[in-house]
């Protein structure tokens, strides 16, 4: 699975870009391809979507966009093509706020998102989209938080143990210390 591509944008179309990475051109579907410039280097965070009849790459400028996209596509009935327009840097906080406040009207403004799907999004994601920076105001723990979330730990539990972990430790040592604290 790919995490990101670092390369030069060689082509811009209405819903995708082509990025050249060491002589290989990857077609990546993006929210707004016109924010990129041809012949300029970029890092594009990607999600590989694989189905029986499809292999697609979806790209994002930031990790936050990608994280929100991954959460959205786990909602029943919401696929990558419907989630992509929802994920744009300017919309991230708005979507998170709409989900937390159960604002169905805001969510239904996106293409193909009806009231039923908006309710499903709220049901599945309410309380799960708290920004990592809200957990603790120290960016030294962002990687640790991400690892612990990927292991299935809840943000409330993570918040309790972070003050007990030294930010001077390596990530590996922070993970070991966090796991010890979680098991207590």
Image (cartoon, rainbow, N blue to C red):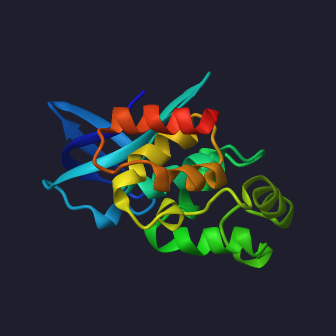
Q: As drawn, which residue projects farthest toward the right?
A: 116
Q: Does residue 80 appear in the picture of this structure?
A: yes
- 2 to the left or right of 112: left
Q: Quadrant of residue 23?
A: top left
Name the foreground residue: 38 vs 116.
116
User: Is 64 displayed left or right of 18 in the figure?
Assistant: right
Residue at image location 45% in from the left, 36% down from the top: 177
On the rendered image, what quadrant is the C terminus found in?
top right
Number of marks in picture? 0
Residue at the image position 20 percent from the left and 39 percent from the top: 20
The image position of residue 131, as x and y in percent, is 53, 63
Q: Quadrant of the N terminus?
A: top left
Whether 97 is drawn above or below 127: the answer is: below
In percent of width and height, residue 46 lies at 40, 42
| Residue 29 appearing in the image | no
Which percent across, then down, holds residue 109?
69, 74
Q: In the image, residue 180 lies at what x, y percent?
A: 54, 32
């Amino acid at each position: 699975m790919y995490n990101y591509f670092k390369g030069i944008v060689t082509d811009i179309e209405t819903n995708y870009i082509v990025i050249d990475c060491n002589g290989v051109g990857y077609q990546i579907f993006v929210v707004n391809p016109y924010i990129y410039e041809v012949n300029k280097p970029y890092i594009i965070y990607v999600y590989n979507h694989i189905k029986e009849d499809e292999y697609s790459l979806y790209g994002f400028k930031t990790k936050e966009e990608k994280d929100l996209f991954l959460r959205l596509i786990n909602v029943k009935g919401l696929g990558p093509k419907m989630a992509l327009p929802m994920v744009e840097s300017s919309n991230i906080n708005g979507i998170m706020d709409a989900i937390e406040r159960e604002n169905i009207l805001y969510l239904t403004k996106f293409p193909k998102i009806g009231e039923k799907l908006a309710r499903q999004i709220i049901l599945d994601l309410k309380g799960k989209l708290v920004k990592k920076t809200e957990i603790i105001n120290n960016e030294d723990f962002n990687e640790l938080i991400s690892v612990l979330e990927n292991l299935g730990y809840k943000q409330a539990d993570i918040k309790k143990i972070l003050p007990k972990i030294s930010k001077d430790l390596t990530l590996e040592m922070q993970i070991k210390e966090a796991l010890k604290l979680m098991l207590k």
